[in-house]
């Protein structure tokens, strides 16, 4: 399973910046990263970490969306943010940090939440979507967009010390609504416990999964849900299947 990216007409010469990872991806894999666009919904502890490592790996374009201003409680995990900029817009600080890591990456940024009509163009423009939002309504909205427009979505989440991850490929794998059909969860999005290092691990996993999908190396984590408890490093996987009666993806085959 691999994401289709547009062909580049001229010869691609990877920068020396990527010399170490070329041993893993090869020139063709690196070119595919360079030619790809990833939309990251949410650039907090999880999404911000994913954005950092995708920028560092040489992704061609990042589209990022996150609302609000930097607050002090963000700083235990949101590593794109800056203590000196508390009270300023998160998205502006995120762009500055990403361009400092890799000035060649194109960053398109929006200080907004995920709403279907507004986010439609971001999903359509991306080769892959990373779901890193902190609340269920936006996650389901993003899931519906990816199903409707046939975009692979790396679904990564964390709570406390636990992490979960799967890759959703519309028409081939369960969507988020198949996995979690109850969409009326009682949920306090800003009150759950967070250790920065745990959200960072989740973000790294999401970045690796995206790089695998784009470059074609390895096997994407599709039709399986990975869970890890970082408190004791116990981990397991469960097989997951599409729900033929899913209210989001039923009848939408590839």
Image (spheres, rainbow, N blue to C red):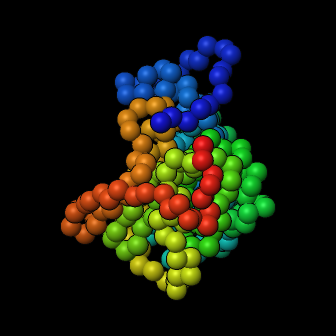
In terms of image quadrants, where is residue 116?
bottom right
* Residue located farthest toward the right when viewing the structure as drawn: 117
Q: Residue at x 28, y 65 (%)?
A: 230
- Which quadrant would the C terminus be assigned to in this image? top right
Name which residue lies at 69% across and 49% down.
149
* Image-based side of 219 in relation to 39, left or right: left
Residue 50 coordinates in the image, percent (x, y): 49, 51
Residue 176 screen position, x and y as percent:
53, 62
Q: Nearer the viewer, residue 140 or 15?
A: 140
* In this view, 182 is above or below 22: below
In the image, taking residue 254 as reference, residue 9 lies left or right, namely right
Q: Residue at x 26, y 59 (%)?
A: 236
Q: Residue at x 44, y 70 (%)?
A: 76
Give x and y (percent) for residue 231.
25, 69
Percent of width and height locating residue 155: 49, 57
Confirm whether residue 167 shows in the render.
yes
Image: 17 above or below 137: above
Q: Residue 101, relative to residue 163: is it above or below?
A: above
- Count of marks, rendered view: 0
Front residue of this view, candidates 16 and 2 = 2
Q: Is residue 79 visible?
A: no
């Amino acid at each position: 399973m691999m994401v289709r990216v547009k062909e580049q007409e001229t010869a691609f010469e990877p920068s020396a910046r990527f010399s170490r990872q070329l041993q893993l991806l090869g020139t063709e894999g690196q070119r595919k990263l360079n030619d790809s666009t990833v939309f990251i919904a949410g650039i907090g502890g999880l999404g911000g970490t994913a954005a950092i490592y995708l920028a560092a790996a040489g992704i061609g374009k990042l589209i990022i969306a996150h609302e609000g201003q930097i607050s002090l409680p963000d700083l235990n995990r949101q590593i794109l943010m800056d203590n000196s900029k508390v009270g300023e817009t998160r998205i502006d600080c995120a762009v500055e940090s990403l361009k400092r890591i890799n000035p060649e990456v194109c960053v398109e940024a929006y200080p907004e939440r995920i709403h279907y009509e507004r986010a439609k163009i971001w999903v359509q423009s991306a080769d892959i979507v990373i779901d890193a939002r902190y609340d269920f309504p936006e996650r389901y909205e993003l899931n519906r967009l990816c199903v409707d427009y046939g975009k692979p979505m790396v679904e990564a989440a964390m709570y406390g010390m636990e992490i979960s991850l799967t890759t959703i490929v519309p028409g081939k794998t369960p969507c988020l609504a198949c996995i979690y059909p109850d969409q009326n969860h009682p949920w306090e999005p800003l009150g759950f416990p967070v250790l920065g290092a745990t959200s960072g691990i989740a973000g790294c996993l999401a970045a690796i999964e995206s790089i695998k999908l784009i470059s074609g190396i390895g096997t994407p984590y599709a039709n399986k849900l990975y869970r890890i408890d970082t408190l004791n490093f116990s981990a397991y996987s469960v097989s997951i299947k599409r729900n033929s009666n899913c209210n989001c993806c039923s009848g939408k085959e590839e």
